[in-house]
Amino acid sequence: TLKGIAFDLDGVLTDTARAHYRAWKRMADQLGIPFDEEANEALKGVDRMGSLALILGDRPGYDEARRVCLASQKNDWYLEEIAHFGPGDLFPGARAALEQCRAAGLGIALASASRNAPLLIARMQVADLFDTIIDPASLAAGKPAPDIFLAAATALGADPAEMLGVEDAPAGVEAIHAAGMKAVGVGTPAALPEADWIIPAIADFDLRDYAD
Ligand code: G6P
Ligand code: MG
């Protein structure tokens, strides 16, 4: 039986992927590094410094101090992008999906790699629907490592085998499976071939489909 569920945020409950992309694109343009939406796909679910490393590749001249500076500049631009976020920026059906889990008595965790996640869920007025928000800064390794989902299980007092993870990124689905949970993928079967179930959007979330 299902005891808990861990939701990713970006790309699952709200469309911040575009905002992240625009902020990274601004930085890449300034550095003269080619970057497009296709390259951006690989950054989904990957933490801030990890994303920067993927954009910079093996280009020389980017020591740790410069990277920290670039990551902070990107985050300032990202904060500009999400400055006006509110409840209307939740994907249709996102609140209903959380309420469905609550009504079923599941523990609900937010398992986002984003340090901006607490700010976003507060602005979108769904913070009260989560029992726990995992702080990615407290973890040794980001997705695709299982740490964030294992921390969610611990915080909810649930066995990972009794939990579901909901993700839009391949790195996230990999992390869910590494933690020993089943994965609901939000997207297309082509993008998330490893997911146990696929829904095109969070509006299609239906707990009854995920009972085993
Ligand atoms: C999520 C997004 C990534 C982002 C990461 C870190 O996983 O999908 O695109 O890089 O969070 O976000 P942050 O807000 O901490 O820079
Ligand atoms: Mg995501």
Image (tube, helix red, strand yellow):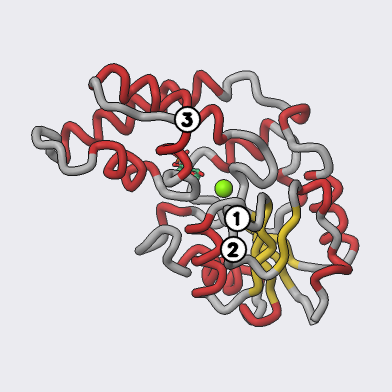
> Marks 3 and 1, how far apart in space?
21 Å
Q: Position of residue 105 (x, y in %)?
A: 85, 68
In the image, which is nearer the foreground, mark 3 or mark 1?
A: 1
Residue 110 visible here: no
> Which quadrant of the figure has residue 70?
top left
Q: Nearer the viewer, residue 37 or 20?
A: 37
Where in the figure is residue 65, as x and y percent of width and height?
Answer: 16, 35
The N terminus lies in quadrant: bottom right
Residue at 53%, 27% in the rendered image: 19
As helix, strand or loop, the secondary structure at mark 3 comes to helix
Q: Is residue 182 left or right of residue 40?
A: right
Q: To which residue does mark 1 refer?
A: 190
Cβ atoms at labels 1 and 2 below 8 Å apart:
yes
Number of numbered discs visible in the structure rendering:
3
The dot on residue 21 is 3
Label 2 C-beta lies within 8 Å of the nearest ligand 2 atom: no
Indicate the amino acid at tag 1: Ala
In the image, residue 173 sits, relative to residue 21, either above or below, namely below
- Nearer the observer, disc 2 or disc 3? 2
Label 3 beta carbon within 8 A of ligand 1: no
Q: State the separation of the CA atoms marked 2 and 3.
A: 23 Å
